Amino acid sequence: MALTALKRLESERGLPVHETTGDQVRRALEAAGILFIESDRGRGVMLLKEAAGASQRPSRGRSRT
């Protein structure tokens, strides 16, 4: 997928994008644990699972040995 296609997809001007491009992005995000939600209060996303390696936070400060 081209960077240009992603920029068009994110555009606030509503630039047209191929339907297959939008589907590819949606499937990739869903595979990463993103759930798209819609209710009477609006639309949004929810993180269903932590991304691989995200639980390993860098240490802050010196390590004690």
Image: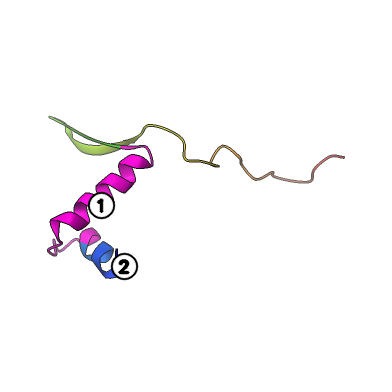
Name the image colouring: rainbow
Is residue 53 shown left or right of residue 60? left
Query: What amino acid is labelled 2 in the image?
Result: Leu
**Residue 17 in the image: x percent, y percent?**
15, 62
Numbered disc in front, either 1 or 2? 1
Is residue 57 shown left or right of residue 3? right
Location of residue 6 by image quarter = bottom left
**Residue 48 in the image: x percent, y percent?**
37, 32
Q: Please, which residue is most extreme toward the right here?
A: 65
Up/down of 45 relative to 28, above or below: above
Is residue 45 shown left or right of residue 33? left
Up/down of 31 relative to 23, above or below: above
Residue 43, magenta (yes or no) = no
Task: Give the CA separation, mark 1 to mark 2.
Answer: 13 Å
Query: Going from the N terminus, do you reach mark 1 or mark 2 first?
Result: 2
Residue 59 or residue 4, whichever sits in front? 4
- Local SS, label 2: helix
Residue under the image location 24 percent in, 59 percent down: 10
**Residue 33 in the image: x percent, y percent?**
37, 37
Residue 31 or residue 54, whichever sits in front? 31
Residue 23 or residue 60, whichever sits in front? 23
Residue under the image location 32 percent in, 47 percent down: 28
- Local SS, label 1: helix
Query: What amino acid is labelled 1 in the image?
Result: Gln
Q: Residues within 10 Å of mark 2 (few under 14, many from 20)?
A: few
**Residue 3 in the image: x percent, y percent?**
31, 67
**Magenta stretch bounds:** 9-34
| Quadrant in which the N terminus is drawn | bottom left
| Quadrant in which the C terminus is drawn | top right
State the residue position of label 2: 3
Q: Which mark is residue 24?
A: 1
